[in-house]
Image (spheres, rainbow, N blue to C red):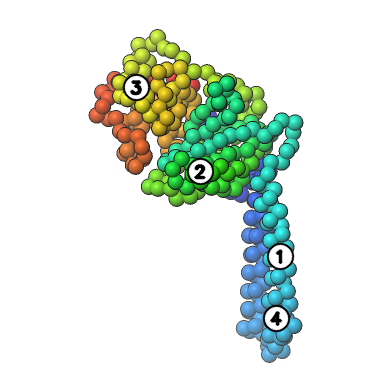
Amino acid sequence: MNLDSANLQAVLSPAGPYAQSIAELSWVLFVGGTVIFLIVGVFLALASFGGPALRAHLGSRRFILAGGVAFPVVVLSALLVWTLGINRAVSLPLGLGSEPPLRIQMIGYQFWWEVRYPGTMPDGGVVTANEVRIPVGRDVVLEVTSADVIHSVWIPALNGKIDMIPGRWNTRPIRADRPGVLRGQCAEFCGAQHALMAFYVVAETPPAFEAWLNRQRLPAPPTADPVMAMGRAAFGAAGCGGCHKIRGTEWNGQIGPDLTHVGGRLSLAAGVLDNHRGTLAGWIAGAQDIKPGNRMPSFATALDGPELRAMAAWLESLK
């Protein structure tokens, strides 16, 4: 999937009904504000260069009460009522279609995202990281919280921002009307690498989404390839399994992202790098150079060249 064609945080290019409502409100405020600004500019010019009679009219009690009191009260009151209605509309699922909303949980960490699909497996659900897959045409309810500091989820093409607060679950519905790749971002300063805490939303047709979900349910496959076996052994010897979980193996770390199907994701390091063998090797060797302050150490001195390349190849194969 080509990320160059992704709809990167397009606030005024909505991909769903919730974002459409926000975009309409934004355009009304922008156009209305521009019109009012121009009207005020015209009155200012008339008051500055008009004759005495015109200036006296513009300064009359009736004109001031009408233009300076009645007009703002009516316009701002109407906007308030409309805005409150939109706020409620974008906070509740539309309830369209015969299927119930899909639940997806997002947990914010410094500086990455855990993504869960509750109820999709007997032992809980599919777990992935830094990427949200959703079916087109179905309501999705995002349930969000934080494991450390306050974060904020923002997918501008699908809905507004929602805070991730430790110890509290907040919800926000999203819905995509067409397939595509959209970008989300942490919108609350959360530390040194806040700017490099992004993720992608992949909206797929329902059959494609179900196929992806079925692949995610599978454990990591065994390998007989000697290079892959070397990479797997290097992963264990370097202690990576102490932080990362890979289902189907002996590693069950809970500190970092689940890597069971890391090779199938679009990006690494929360949207910082495209995902392929070269970037996997670069991230393993220089995580602190690429994203200083994240919790993963650099392994440049712990692995030799063949081990690093083999580990990157093995992780890439986990799709």
Give the alpha-carbon distance from disc 1 to disc 3, as whole Å. 61 Å
Going from the N terminus, do you reach mark 1 or mark 3 first?
1
Instruction: Kindly identify which numbered label has been placed on residue 167.
Output: 2
Residue depicted at x 42% and y 41%: 110
Q: Is residue 40 above or below residue 197?
A: below
Going from the N terminus, do you reach mark 3 or mark 2 first?
2
Q: Counting other residues with Cα less than 10 Å from the Cα at mark 4, is it few (<14), some (14-19), or many (20 or more)? A: some
Give the alpha-carbon distance from disc 3 to disc 2, as whole Å. 33 Å
Give the alpha-carbon distance from disc 2 to disc 1, as whole Å. 36 Å
Front of the two marks 2 and 1: 2
Q: Is residue 178 above or below residue 55?
A: above
Give the alpha-carbon distance from disc 4 to disc 2, as whole Å. 51 Å
Residue tagged 3? 235
Q: Counting other residues with Cα less than 10 Å from the Cα at mark 3, is it few (<14), some (14-19), or many (20 or more)? A: many
Foreground: 150 or 71?
Answer: 150
Residue 242 locus on image (x, y percent): 36, 26
Q: Counting other residues with Cα less than 10 Å from the Cα at mark 2, is it few (<14), some (14-19), or many (20 or more)? A: few
Q: Counting other residues with Cα less than 10 Å from the Cα at mark 1, is it few (<14), some (14-19), or many (20 or more)? A: few
- Left or right of 53? Residue 130 is left
Residue furthest front in the image: 167
Count of numbered tags: 4
Res. 250 in view: yes
Instruction: Kindly identify which numbered label has been placed on residue 64.
Output: 4
Q: Is residue 9 above or below residue 231?
A: below
Front of the two marks 3 and 2: 2
Instruction: Kindly identify which numbered label has been placed on residue 77.
Output: 1
Q: Mark 3: which amino acid?
A: Phe
Residue 274 locus on image (x, y percent): 44, 33
